Amino acid sequence: EKINEKVQEMEKDGYQIKTMSFWGTDKVVIIFKKGLKGSLL
């Protein structure tokens, strides 16, 4: 549910959610996690 909220927020910001849907939710989650780790370093 939280992911859906994030997606809606990103859609408002103009991100290309269709591309994410194409990748699949699992890959998107992995990318989010890697992105969060990267931003923390």
Image (cartoon, grey):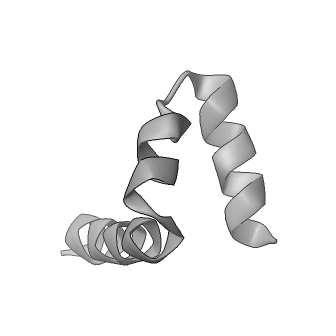
**Residue 33 placed where, x, y %?**
38, 77
In terms of image quadrants, where is residue 30?
Answer: bottom left
In the displayed structure, 28 sits above or below 12; it is below
In terms of image quadrants, where is residue 13?
Answer: top right
- Residue at (28, 78) in percent of width and height: 37
Give the total of numbered labels. Answer: 0
**Residue 26 placed where, x, y %?**
46, 77
Quadrant where the C terminus sits is: bottom left
Q: Is residue 41 left or right of residue 34?
A: left
- Which one is nearer the viewer's eye here, 11 or 37? 11
- Which one is nearer the viewer's eye here, 26 or 37? 26
Q: Is residue 5 left or right of residue 29?
A: right
In the displayed structure, 12 sits above or below 20; it is above
Give the farthest residue toward the top: 14
Q: Is residue 14 left or right of residue 9?
A: left
Quadrant where the N terminus sits is: bottom right
- Residue at (41, 40) in percent of width and height: 19
**Residue 15 placed where, x, y %?**
49, 30
- Which one is nearer the viewer's eye here, 36 or 29? 29
- Residue at (43, 65) in percent of width and height: 28
